[in-house]
Image: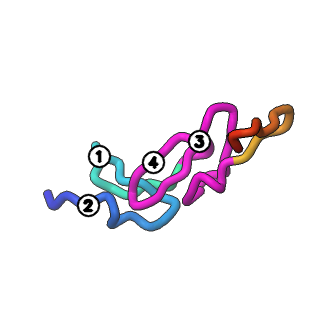
Amino acid sequence: MIFLPADACDPGSFLNATTNECVSCRPGYYCSAGIITRCPDNMASPANSTEVSGCYCPSGYTLDSSGF
């Protein structure tokens, strides 16, 4: 088996280390350079988000002074 480098995945996807396949980023996360990262606490994001700026406050939440 040839293992893919994480950065082989397109923006908005991440490398699943178990299957060695690029997978679409899940809601509530953002994926860049093949790495999946959870949005900050109490924030959401649509599927296939590519950066933290894709995370947003869902209805009923507001940003604090730090921006999160």
Q: Quadrant of the C terminus?
A: top right
Q: Amino acid at mark 4?
A: Ile
Pointer 2: what residue? 5
Foreground label between 3 and 1: 3
The answer for how far apart the CA atoms under marks 4 and 2 are is 14 Å
Res 17 label: 1
Q: Quadrant of the N terminus?
A: bottom left
Asked if residue 15 is positioned above or below residue 27 in the image, the reply reads below
The answer for how far apart the CA atoms under marks 4 and 1 are is 11 Å
Mark with earlier residue (3, 2): 2
Magenta segment boundaries in residue numbering: 26-55
Farthest left residue?
A: 1
Structural crowding at the residue carrying mark 1, measured as other residues with C-alpha within 10 Å and reported as few (<14), some (14–19) or many (≥20): few
Pointer 4: what residue? 36
Quarter location, residue 61:
top right
Q: Is residue 29 magenta?
A: yes
Structural crowding at the residue carrying mark 4, measured as other residues with C-alpha within 10 Å and reported as few (<14), some (14–19) or many (≥20): many
Mark 4: secondary structure: strand
Looking at the picture, tell me which residue is in the foreground, 6 or 53: 53
Mark with earlier residue (2, 1): 2
Mark 3: secondary structure: loop
Res 39 label: 3
Q: Residue at x 31, y 58 (%)?
A: 6
